[in-house]
């Protein structure tokens, strides 16, 4: 038996099948997310976060079956 890995790193805009269904990645840095972090900690204020910053996160939009044509 031989296993062949056909996976590729997930990147925004990579070739996909069918065309038009490319994965989309939105990058949010620490300065963009304090309000999101504060939703998890009622009563906390942004000045109580380290440096007043939130989490750095990526939002992924993709279909479950994506790959090269």
Image (cartoon, rainbow, N blue to C red):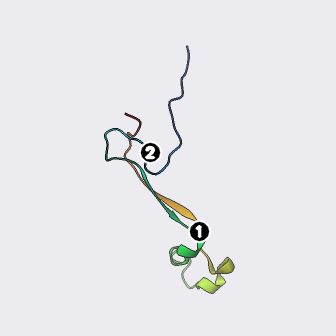
Q: Which sits in the foreground, 54 or 29?
A: 29
**Which of pointers 2 and 1 indicates the residue nearer the eye?**
2
In percent of width and height, residue 50 lies at: 68, 77
In percent of width and height, residue 39 lies at: 50, 76
Q: Earlier in the sequence, mark 2 or mark 1?
A: 2
Q: Residue visible at 50% across and 46% down?
A: 10
The circle drawn on residue 66 is none
- For the N terminus, the quadrant is top right
Q: Is any part of residue 33 visible from this angle?
A: no
Relative to 63, is 7 above or below?
A: above
Relative to 32, is 24 above or below?
A: above
Q: Which sits in the foreground, 18 or 48?
A: 18
3D distance between C-alphas at marks 2 and 1: 26 Å
Q: Residue visible at 41% across and 37% down?
A: 67
Label 2, on which residue? 14
Q: Residue visible at 31% across and 47% down?
A: 20
- For the C terminus, the quadrant is top left
In percent of width and height, residue 60 lies at: 45, 55
Q: Residue visible at 38% across and 41% down?
A: 16
Q: Residues within 10 Å of mark 1 (few under 14, many from 20)?
A: some
Q: Residue furthest right?
A: 50
Relative to 30, is 19 above or below?
A: above
Q: Is any part of residue 21 visible from this angle?
A: yes
Q: Is residue 5 left or right of residue 51?
A: left
**Number of labelled discs?**
2
Label 1, on which residue? 55
């Amino acid at each position: 038996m031989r296993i062949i890995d056909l996976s590729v790193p997930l990147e925004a805009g990579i070739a996909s099948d069918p065309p038009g269904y490319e994965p989309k990645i939105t990058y949010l840095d620490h300065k963009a997310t304090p309000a999101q972090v504060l939703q998890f900690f009622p009563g906390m204020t942004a000045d109580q976060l380290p440096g007043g910053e939130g989490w750095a996160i990526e939002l992924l939009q993709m279909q479950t079956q994506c790959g090269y044509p």
